Protein backbone atom coordinates (compact mmCIF):
# COMPACT_ATOMS: atom_id res chain seq x y z
CA UNK A 1 0.00 0.00 0.00
CA UNK A 2 3.05 2.28 -0.06
CA UNK A 3 2.70 2.98 -3.78
CA UNK A 4 1.92 6.52 -4.86
CA UNK A 5 -1.40 7.35 -6.48
CA UNK A 6 -1.23 7.59 -10.27
CA UNK A 7 -3.85 9.79 -11.95
CA UNK A 8 -4.23 10.07 -15.73
CA UNK A 9 -5.91 13.17 -17.17
CA UNK A 10 -7.80 11.67 -20.11
CA UNK A 11 -11.48 12.57 -20.82
CA UNK A 12 -11.95 9.43 -22.92
CA UNK A 13 -10.69 7.28 -20.06
CA UNK A 14 -12.97 9.10 -17.62
CA UNK A 15 -15.98 8.36 -19.83
CA UNK A 16 -15.07 4.67 -20.15
CA UNK A 17 -14.46 4.26 -16.45
CA UNK A 18 -17.61 6.22 -15.60
CA UNK A 19 -19.62 3.85 -17.78
CA UNK A 20 -18.16 0.84 -16.00
CA UNK A 21 -18.96 2.32 -12.58
CA UNK A 22 -22.52 3.12 -13.70
CA UNK A 23 -23.11 -0.47 -14.89
CA UNK A 24 -21.62 -1.82 -11.67
CA UNK A 25 -23.73 0.50 -9.50
CA UNK A 26 -26.92 -0.27 -11.44
CA UNK A 27 -26.47 -4.03 -11.10
CA UNK A 28 -25.40 -3.80 -7.46
CA UNK A 29 -28.68 -2.03 -6.63
CA UNK A 30 -31.02 -3.62 -9.18
CA UNK A 31 -30.18 -7.35 -8.87
CA UNK A 32 -30.57 -7.57 -5.06
CA UNK A 33 -33.74 -5.44 -5.09
CA UNK A 34 -35.51 -7.39 -7.85
CA UNK A 35 -34.16 -10.92 -7.38
CA UNK A 36 -32.19 -11.56 -4.20
CA UNK A 37 -34.18 -9.83 -1.45
CA UNK A 38 -37.68 -10.85 -2.69
CA UNK A 39 -36.69 -14.51 -3.01
CA UNK A 40 -34.90 -14.39 0.34
CA UNK A 41 -38.02 -13.01 2.06
CA UNK A 42 -40.09 -15.85 0.61
CA UNK A 43 -37.52 -18.46 1.64
CA UNK A 44 -36.35 -19.49 -1.84
CA UNK A 45 -32.68 -18.64 -1.25
CA UNK A 46 -30.42 -18.29 1.77
CA UNK A 47 -28.68 -15.21 3.10
CA UNK A 48 -25.37 -16.65 1.86
CA UNK A 49 -26.42 -16.01 -1.75
CA UNK A 50 -26.87 -12.31 -0.94
CA UNK A 51 -23.58 -12.11 0.96
CA UNK A 52 -21.71 -13.81 -1.90
CA UNK A 53 -23.15 -11.35 -4.41
CA UNK A 54 -22.13 -8.31 -2.37
CA UNK A 55 -18.74 -9.90 -1.70
CA UNK A 56 -18.10 -10.31 -5.45
CA UNK A 57 -19.41 -6.81 -6.14
CA UNK A 58 -17.16 -5.26 -3.49
CA UNK A 59 -14.04 -7.00 -4.74
CA UNK A 60 -14.89 -6.06 -8.32
CA UNK A 61 -15.14 -2.32 -7.64
CA UNK A 62 -12.14 -2.41 -5.29
CA UNK A 63 -9.91 -3.99 -7.93
CA UNK A 64 -11.20 -1.50 -10.52
CA UNK A 65 -10.38 1.53 -8.39
CA UNK A 66 -7.00 0.19 -7.31
CA UNK A 67 -5.99 -0.72 -10.87
CA UNK A 68 -7.05 2.75 -11.97
CA UNK A 69 -5.05 4.77 -9.44
CA UNK A 70 -2.07 2.45 -8.97
CA UNK A 71 1.27 3.43 -10.45
CA UNK A 72 1.79 1.04 -13.38
CA UNK A 73 5.56 1.43 -13.24
CA UNK A 74 6.22 4.99 -14.39
CA UNK A 75 9.92 5.74 -14.74
CA UNK A 76 11.30 8.76 -12.83
CA UNK A 77 12.75 11.67 -14.77
CA UNK A 78 16.32 11.03 -13.64
CA UNK A 79 16.56 7.31 -12.93
CA UNK A 80 19.63 6.01 -11.13
CA UNK A 81 21.09 3.28 -13.29
CA UNK A 82 23.35 0.76 -11.52
CA UNK A 83 26.64 0.28 -13.32
CA UNK A 84 26.08 -3.46 -13.57
CA UNK A 85 22.71 -2.95 -15.32
CA UNK A 86 23.56 -0.25 -17.84
CA UNK A 87 23.69 -2.74 -20.68
CA UNK A 88 20.03 -3.56 -20.01
CA UNK A 89 18.91 0.05 -20.46
CA UNK A 90 18.15 1.94 -23.65
CA UNK A 91 17.17 5.43 -24.78
CA UNK A 92 13.52 6.17 -25.54
CA UNK A 93 13.25 7.96 -28.87
CA UNK A 94 10.01 9.71 -27.80
CA UNK A 95 10.79 11.19 -24.38
CA UNK A 96 14.62 11.00 -24.64
CA UNK A 97 14.89 9.23 -21.28
CA UNK A 98 16.80 6.13 -20.34
CA UNK A 99 14.59 3.16 -19.60
CA UNK A 100 15.03 -0.57 -18.89
CA UNK A 101 14.50 -2.94 -21.77
CA UNK A 102 10.94 -4.29 -22.11
CA UNK A 103 9.71 -0.83 -21.13
CA UNK A 104 7.48 1.06 -23.55
CA UNK A 105 6.38 4.63 -24.04
CA UNK A 106 2.66 5.32 -23.66
CA UNK A 107 1.61 8.13 -25.98
CA UNK A 108 -1.64 8.64 -24.06
CA UNK A 109 -0.01 8.94 -20.63
CA UNK A 110 3.10 10.67 -21.99
CA UNK A 111 5.77 8.62 -20.21
CA UNK A 112 7.53 5.26 -20.24
CA UNK A 113 6.22 2.33 -18.21
CA UNK A 114 8.22 -0.67 -17.07
CA UNK A 115 7.06 -3.90 -18.72
CA UNK A 116 4.05 -2.11 -20.21
CA UNK A 117 1.36 -4.47 -21.49
CA UNK A 118 -1.14 -1.96 -22.89
CA UNK A 119 -3.08 1.19 -22.06
CA UNK A 120 -6.58 0.29 -20.92
CA UNK A 121 -9.22 3.03 -21.29
CA UNK A 122 -11.62 1.10 -19.03
CA UNK A 123 -9.36 1.70 -16.03
CA UNK A 124 -7.97 4.98 -17.45
CA UNK A 125 -4.44 3.75 -16.83
CA UNK A 126 -1.60 1.76 -18.30
CA UNK A 127 -1.16 -1.89 -17.37
CA UNK A 128 2.46 -2.33 -16.38
CA UNK A 129 4.80 -4.05 -13.98
CA UNK A 130 3.34 -2.64 -10.76
CA UNK A 131 -0.40 -2.93 -11.46
CA UNK A 132 -0.63 -5.92 -13.81
CA UNK A 133 -1.73 -8.10 -10.90
CA UNK A 134 -4.52 -5.67 -10.06
CA UNK A 135 -5.72 -5.71 -13.66
CA UNK A 136 -5.84 -9.52 -13.62
CA UNK A 137 -7.83 -9.39 -10.38
CA UNK A 138 -10.25 -6.97 -12.03
CA UNK A 139 -10.76 -9.33 -14.98
CA UNK A 140 -11.28 -12.26 -12.62
CA UNK A 141 -13.83 -10.60 -10.33
CA UNK A 142 -15.66 -9.02 -13.29
CA UNK A 143 -16.05 -12.47 -14.82
CA UNK A 144 -17.24 -13.94 -11.51
CA UNK A 145 -19.75 -11.13 -10.92
CA UNK A 146 -21.08 -11.28 -14.49
CA UNK A 147 -21.47 -15.07 -14.37
CA UNK A 148 -23.17 -14.89 -10.99
CA UNK A 149 -25.61 -12.25 -12.29
CA UNK A 150 -26.47 -14.34 -15.35
CA UNK A 151 -27.06 -17.41 -13.18
CA UNK A 152 -29.36 -15.43 -10.88
CA UNK A 153 -31.30 -14.06 -13.86
CA UNK A 154 -31.73 -17.56 -15.29
CA UNK A 155 -32.82 -19.02 -11.95
CA UNK A 156 -35.21 -16.13 -11.38
CA UNK A 157 -37.11 -16.80 -14.61
CA UNK A 158 -36.76 -20.57 -14.88
CA UNK A 159 -35.79 -22.28 -11.60
CA UNK A 160 -36.93 -20.27 -8.56
CA UNK A 161 -40.52 -20.56 -7.38
CA UNK A 162 -42.76 -17.70 -8.59
CA UNK A 163 -42.89 -14.67 -6.33
CA UNK A 164 -46.20 -14.35 -4.51
CA UNK A 165 -45.98 -10.62 -3.90
CA UNK A 166 -45.95 -9.63 -7.54
CA UNK A 167 -47.26 -11.22 -10.73
CA UNK A 168 -44.38 -11.16 -13.23
CA UNK A 169 -46.70 -11.87 -16.24
CA UNK A 170 -48.42 -8.50 -16.04
CA UNK A 171 -47.43 -5.45 -18.09
CA UNK A 172 -45.98 -2.28 -16.59
CA UNK A 173 -49.30 -0.42 -16.85
CA UNK A 174 -51.14 -3.29 -15.17
CA UNK A 175 -48.64 -3.30 -12.32
CA UNK A 176 -49.06 0.45 -11.83
CA UNK A 177 -52.85 0.33 -11.86
CA UNK A 178 -53.08 -2.95 -9.87
CA UNK A 179 -55.87 -4.06 -12.20
CA UNK A 180 -54.78 -7.68 -12.18
CA UNK A 181 -54.69 -8.34 -8.46
CA UNK A 182 -57.98 -10.23 -8.51
CA UNK A 183 -57.40 -12.09 -11.78
CA UNK A 184 -56.73 -15.79 -11.38
CA UNK A 185 -54.95 -17.37 -14.31
CA UNK A 186 -52.38 -20.08 -14.94
CA UNK A 187 -48.78 -18.93 -14.97
CA UNK A 188 -47.13 -19.04 -18.37
CA UNK A 189 -43.74 -20.67 -18.89
CA UNK A 190 -40.97 -18.13 -19.37
CA UNK A 191 -40.39 -19.41 -22.91
CA UNK A 192 -44.01 -18.63 -23.80
CA UNK A 193 -43.77 -15.13 -22.34
CA UNK A 194 -40.64 -14.24 -24.32
CA UNK A 195 -41.98 -15.90 -27.47
CA UNK A 196 -45.07 -13.66 -27.34
CA UNK A 197 -42.98 -10.57 -26.70
CA UNK A 198 -40.53 -11.25 -29.54
CA UNK A 199 -43.10 -12.77 -31.90
CA UNK A 200 -41.34 -16.08 -32.54
CA UNK A 201 -40.65 -19.42 -30.88
CA UNK A 202 -37.14 -19.52 -32.38
CA UNK A 203 -34.96 -18.31 -29.52
CA UNK A 204 -32.03 -17.45 -31.78
CA UNK A 205 -34.25 -14.89 -33.55
CA UNK A 206 -34.85 -13.05 -30.27
CA UNK A 207 -31.39 -11.52 -30.68
CA UNK A 208 -31.78 -10.51 -34.36
CA UNK A 209 -32.94 -6.90 -34.88
CA UNK A 210 -33.22 -7.17 -38.70
CA UNK A 211 -36.63 -8.81 -38.88
CA UNK A 212 -40.34 -8.08 -38.58
CA UNK A 213 -42.26 -9.18 -35.52
CA UNK A 214 -45.26 -11.43 -36.20
CA UNK A 215 -47.90 -11.83 -33.43
CA UNK A 216 -48.18 -15.38 -32.13
CA UNK A 217 -51.39 -17.28 -31.69
CA UNK A 218 -52.03 -17.38 -27.96
CA UNK A 219 -53.51 -20.56 -26.42
CA UNK A 220 -57.18 -20.23 -25.52
CA UNK A 221 -56.72 -20.38 -21.75
CA UNK A 222 -54.28 -17.43 -21.99
CA UNK A 223 -56.18 -15.45 -24.61
CA UNK A 224 -58.30 -13.40 -22.23
CA UNK A 225 -55.34 -12.32 -20.13
CA UNK A 226 -52.88 -10.98 -22.72
Image (tube, rainbow, N blue to C red):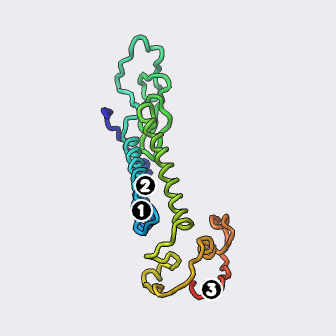
Q: Earlier in the sequence, mark 2 or mark 3?
A: 2
Residue to which mark 1 is pinned? 32
Q: Earlier in the sequence, mark 3 or mark 1?
A: 1
**Secondary element type, mark 3:** helix
Instruction: For marks 3 and 1, give the one nearer the viewer.
Output: 3
Spot occupied by residue 27 in the image (x, y as percentages of width and height): 43, 59
| Relative depth, front residue between 35 and 132 | 35
Q: Name the residue at 44% across, 31% down.
A: 129
Spot occupied by residue 208 in the image (x, y as percentages of width and height): 65, 65
Residue to which mark 2 is pinned? 53
Q: Earlier in the sequence, mark 1 or mark 2?
A: 1
Residue to which mark 3 is pinned? 221
Quarter of the image where the N terminus is located: top left
Query: In whole angstroms, how far apart are the C-alphas of marks 3 and 1?
Result: 34 Å
Query: In whole angstroms, how far apart are the C-alphas of marks 1 and 2?
Result: 8 Å
**Secondary element type, mark 2:** helix
Query: In whole angstroms, how far apart are the C-alphas of marks 2 and 3?
Result: 39 Å
Using the image, tell me which numbered label, if any, was put on residue 190.
none
Q: Name the residue at 45% across, 80% down.
A: 175
Amino acid sequence: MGRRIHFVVDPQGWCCMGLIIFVWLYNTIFIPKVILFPHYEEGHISAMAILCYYFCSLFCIASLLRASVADPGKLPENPKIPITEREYWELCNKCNMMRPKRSHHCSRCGHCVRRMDHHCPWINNCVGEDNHWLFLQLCFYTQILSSYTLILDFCHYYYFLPLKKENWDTTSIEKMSNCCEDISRPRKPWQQIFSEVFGTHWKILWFIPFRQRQPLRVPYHFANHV
